[in-house]
Image: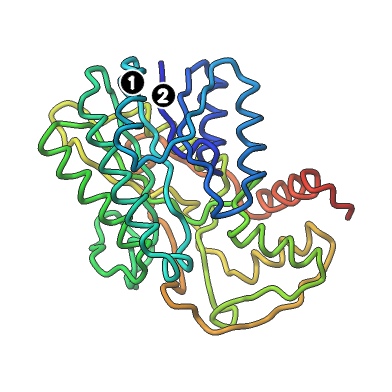
Amino acid sequence: MTVLVTGAAGFIGFHTSLALLARGETVVGIDNVNDYYDVSLKRARLARLGEHGGFSCHEIDIADREAVFALFAAHPDIRGIVHLAAQAGVRYSLINPYAYTHSNVEGHLVLLEAARKLEGLKHFVYASSSSVYGTNTKLPFSIDDRVDTPISIYAATKKSMEMISHAYSHLYGLPLTGLRFFTVYGPWGRPDMAAFLFARKILAGEAIPVFNQGDMRRDFTYIDDIVAGVIGCLDHPPADGGPKARVYNIGNNRSERLMDYIAEIEKALGRKATIDFQPMQPGDVKETYADIAATTRDFGFVPRTPIGEGVPRFVDWYCDHYGVKR
């Protein structure tokens, strides 16, 4: 089967593409390889993917209608779409909000327009985010909760993607599933995420910023579990006669103290962190926690990696990739 993966040079897109290639799928990648973070890391991921004969990558912007439509016309055999390309990051959305509407809203719309013309499309899976839960205080976060109180531009664009998807599903019968990811970490991760930031600063002897005076909890989810969820979802499109537009949580089903997460990084590095406690940041939330009952029921999703296993794997990769001696 030919699967289109957007954001193939990104963290989750890279790992998802590897897993699809490992099971014999042909992967057509899209990524504009922008400079939101270290381009050399994205290039290294693409180089690793390029070692597989079934992979190709097209460096285009998903909001570029002409380029996307031409790519779809050249690959009428696409049967699955895993749309992971996005402008990520809650805090950056306060600095450059236009990047979020461009990539997350306009780009998603362009892909939906192209996808509805594919005759053999079986399933279109796209990345949403736990950020859509906004000011919700009921825990764990359930897909049945209202999500109309976003507190960041990033979250608002992800909710917009879900709403637009529902409309396209209703209008054109597209099989669309949104996955609300919860704080993903692991090898080849994003430099703007906590594990990467903390490891780099601890190794450099710099203080790490910890918001809300450390009183934060997150449903940290290891990348291998995320990928298992993405592919499990891709393999289970909406059933005939049921709703064509769905959303699910993909999380570890555990809410961990941020300070415990930092302690695992310290232990794996063999070094203590200097903590710079700071107030809560605009657009941030105090706690996330995924209810995954529906995800487990409908496509067998079971997270298997606690932070005590996942964090050392990330640190091992980080030290190996950057030549760090511990």
Q: Position of residue 82 (x, y in %)?
A: 39, 34
Q: Quadrant of residue 9?
A: top right
Q: Which residue is mark 1?
A: 79
For the point 33% across and 64% down, the residue is: 133
Give the left or right position of residue 129, taking residue 52 as reference: left
Give the left or right position of residue 156, taking residue 9 as reference: left
Q: Amino acid at mark 1?
A: Arg
Query: From mark 2 to mark 1, how far is it between C-alphas?
Result: 6 Å
Instruction: Name the mark on residue 234.
Output: none
For the point 64% across and 71% down, the residue is: 259
Q: Earlier in the sequence, mark 2 or mark 1?
A: 2
Q: Label 1, secondary structure: give it.
A: strand
Contact between marks 2 and 1 (CB within 8 A): the answer is yes
Instruction: Name the mark on residue 3.
Output: 2
For the point 29% across and 36% down, the residue is: 65
- In the image, residue 55 sits, relative to residue 43, either above or below, namely above
- In the image, residue 66 sits, relative to residue 267, either above or below, namely above
Give the left or right position of residue 117, taking residue 324 as reference: left
Q: Position of residue 326 (x, y in %)?
A: 88, 55
Q: Position of residue 168 (x, y in %)?
A: 17, 39
